């Protein structure tokens, strides 16, 4: 998917998990997210989430430096990212080999 010379940075199933969690209606259900249990954290998922949030931080900084052409309410990370939900989607994508439609909760 995304390559650095000789190394694959992002695999297809990881991209699917990112997109599925960003578009999931469960992202806006705090009770569901609070009760969601992740048995074993995937270190790769933690690494990807940290890399993603680092990129978000840089994008927010650039937005602020340019006078906020994109309003803050459209930039809030909690509107499109939840680490626990990402872990859940990665587990589904990697261990359970779920199809994209299943990752997207049938939508």
Image (cartoon, rainbow, N blue to C red):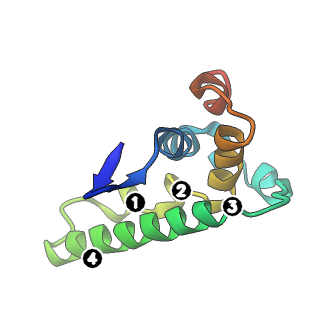
Q: Which quadrant, please, contains the N terminus?
A: top left
Q: CA distance from mark 3 to mark 2?
A: 17 Å
Marks 3, 4: nearer the viewer: 3
Crowd tier of the residue under label 1, counting other residues whose Cα lies within 10 Å: few below 14, some 14–19, many 20 or above: few
Q: Residue at x 18, y 61 (%)?
A: 69
Q: Which quadrant, please, contains the C terminus?
A: top right
Query: For this rendering, which residue is in front, 102 or 30?
Result: 102
Q: CA distance from mark 1 to mark 4?
A: 15 Å
Choose the circle earlier in sequence order: 3 or 2: 3
Marks 2, 1: nearer the viewer: 2
Can you identify the residue that label 3 sits on?
A: 42
Choose the circle earlier in sequence order: 1 or 4: 4
Residue 100 at what x, y percent from top left?
Answer: 57, 27
* Label 1: element kind: helix
Q: CA distance from mark 3 to mark 4?
A: 29 Å
Can you identify the residue that label 1 sits on?
A: 73
Q: CA distance from mark 3 to mark 1?
A: 30 Å
Can you identify the residue that label 4 sits on?
A: 61
Q: CA distance from mark 2 to mark 1?
A: 14 Å
* Label 3: element kind: loop
Choose the circle earlier in sequence order: 3 or 1: 3
Residue 54 at what x, y percent from top left?
Answer: 40, 73
Crowd tier of the residue under label 4, counting other residues whose Cα lies within 10 Å: few below 14, some 14–19, many 20 or above: few
Q: Residue at x 44, y 68 (%)?
A: 51
Picture quadrant of residue 58: bottom left
Can you identify the residue that label 2 sits on?
A: 81
Marks 1, 4: nearer the viewer: 4
């Amino acid at each position: 998917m995304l390559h650095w010379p000789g190394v694959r940075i992002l695999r297809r199933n990881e991209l699917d998990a990112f997109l599925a969690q960003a578009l999931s209606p469960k992202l806006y259900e705090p009770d569901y997210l609070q009760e969601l249990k992740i048995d074993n954290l995937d270190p790769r998922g933690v690494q990807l989430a940290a890399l993603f949030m680092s990129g978000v931080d840089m994008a927010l900084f650039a937005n602020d430096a340019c006078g906020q052409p994109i309003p803050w309410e459209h930039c809030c990370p909690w509107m499109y990212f939840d680490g626990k939900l990402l872990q859940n989607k990665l587990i589904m994508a990697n261990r359970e080999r779920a199809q994209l439609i299943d990752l997207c909760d049938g939508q």
